[in-house]
Image (cartoon, grey):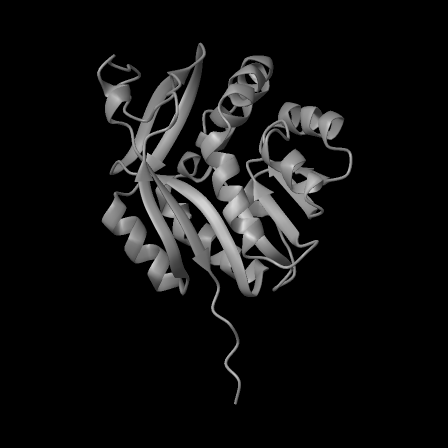
C-alpha cells in the first residue's frame, strides 16, 4: 500500500467494500434528493458522470433507472467490481479522478458525493475546473464538499486509515465562483446518520461529540450557457 493520500484511500475502500456497501444502502436520502434535482434540470436520457460511484448504489442504479447514460468512476477497483455486478448498463472506470480524460462538453450532468474531500485540497480547484470543462454548456454539477478548513486529516474508518482535506465554506464558495459556475442552490447540512469517518478527526482520533457538528456543503451549480452573438 502506498502512503500517499490516493494509496491510503484506494487500499481502505478495497478492504471495507462489504461494510461500506451495508452503510451506503442505509444512507441514501440526501444523495437521492440531490440526484433528483439534477435529473429535473436535464433533458431526457442525459449523459451523466458520477465521480466516486462506490458500489453503484444508490446513484448509478437510480440514474440508469431514470434512463440516463451513465459513466461511473471510483479509485477503488473493488468498488468498481461491485458496481459492475449491480449496474451492468453503466460504463465504469477504476482509477484516480484527477487522471480521467474526457472530451470537452461530454456530459449533461456530473455528480460527486462524499468524494472530493478525499483529494488533497491543493488539487481541488484543478479538479473542479476539469469538471466544468467536461460539462456541456448549461450542464449541471451536483456535489458536496466538507466544511472544515484543514489541509490534511489522517484518521481511521472501519479499522483502516483514511485521509481527508478541505477548505472552509467561504473558500469553497469563492473557488466555485471563480471557476465560472452559476450556483443554483447551496445548503450546509448534516448527514442523515453520521458514520465513523465524519471529518472532525484529529491525530487519528474521533471524539464522540465531533459527529454532532459535522456539516457538508451541498451544491447545485450550472455551467454557463454559450453567449449568442
**Quarter-of-image position of residue 117:** top left
Which of 140/80 is in front?
140
Q: Residue furthest top?
A: 159
- The correct choice, above or below, for 195 with respect to 108 in the image is above
* In the image: residue 216, left or right of residue 74: left
- The correct choice, above or below, for 216 with respect to 156 in the image is below
Residue that appears at 63% across and 53% down: 101
Q: Residue furthest front?
A: 40
Q: Position of residue 20 (x, y in %)?
A: 54, 18
**Quarter-of-image position of residue 199:** top left
Q: Position of residue 194 (x, y in %)?
A: 37, 21
Residue 202 seen in render: no
**Quarter-of-image position of residue 215:** top left
Q: Position of residue 82 (x, y in %)?
A: 68, 24
* In the image: residue 191, left or right of residue 212: right
Q: Residue furthest bottom?
A: 229
Residue that appears at 55% across and 43% down: 97
Looking at the rendered image, the quarter that the N terminus falls into is: top right
Residue that appears at 73% across and 30% down: 84
Which of 216/163 is in front?
216
Residue that appears at 57% across and 54% down: 109
Residue 207 seen in render: yes
The mark total stands at 0
Which of 204/51 is in front?
51
* In the image: residue 91, left or right of residue 126: right
Q: Residue furthest right?
A: 88
Q: Position of residue 148 (x, y in %)?
A: 26, 36
- The correct choice, above or below, for 93 with respect to 18 in the image is below
Amino acid at each position: 500500500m502506498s502512503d500517499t493520500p490516493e494509496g491510503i484511500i484506494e487500499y481502505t475502500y478495497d478492504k471495507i467494500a462489504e461494510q461500506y456497501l451495508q452503510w451506503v444502502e442505509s444512507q441514501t436520502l440526501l444523495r437521492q434528493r440531490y440526484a433528483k434535482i439534477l435529473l429535473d434540470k436535464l433533458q431526457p436520457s442525459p449523459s451523466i458522470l458520477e465521480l466516486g460511484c462506490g458500489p453503484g448504489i444508490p446513484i448509478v442504479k437510480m440514474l440508469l433507472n431514470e434512463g440516463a447514460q451513465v459513466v461511473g468512476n471510483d479509485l477503488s477497483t473493488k468498488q468498481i467490481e461491485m458496481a459492475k455486478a449491480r449496474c451492468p448498463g453503466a460504463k465504469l472506470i477504476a482509477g484516480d479522478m484527477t487522471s480521467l480524460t474526457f472530451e470537452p462538453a461530454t456530459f449533461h450532468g456530473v455528480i460527486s458525493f462524499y468524494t472530493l474531500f478525499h483529494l488533497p485540497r491543493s488539487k481541488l480547484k484543478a479538479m473542479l475546473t476539469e469538471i466544468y470543462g467536461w460539462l456541456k454548456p448549461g450542464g449541471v454539477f451536483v456535489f458536496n464538499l466538507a466544511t472544515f478548513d484543514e489541509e490534511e486529516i489522517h484518521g481511521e474508518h472501519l479499522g483502516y486509515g483514511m485521509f481527508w482535506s478541505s477548505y472552509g465554506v467561504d473558500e469553497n464558495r469563492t473557488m466555485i465562483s471563480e471557476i465560472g459556475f452559476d450556483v443554483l442552490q447551496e445548503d450546509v447540512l448534516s448527514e442523515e446518520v453520521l458514520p465513523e469517518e465524519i471529518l472532525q478527526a484529529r491525530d487519528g482520533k474521533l471524539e464522540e461529540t465531533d459527529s454532532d457538528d459535522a456539516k457538508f456543503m451541498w451544491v447545485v451549480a450550472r455551467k454557463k450557457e454559450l453567449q449568442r452573438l
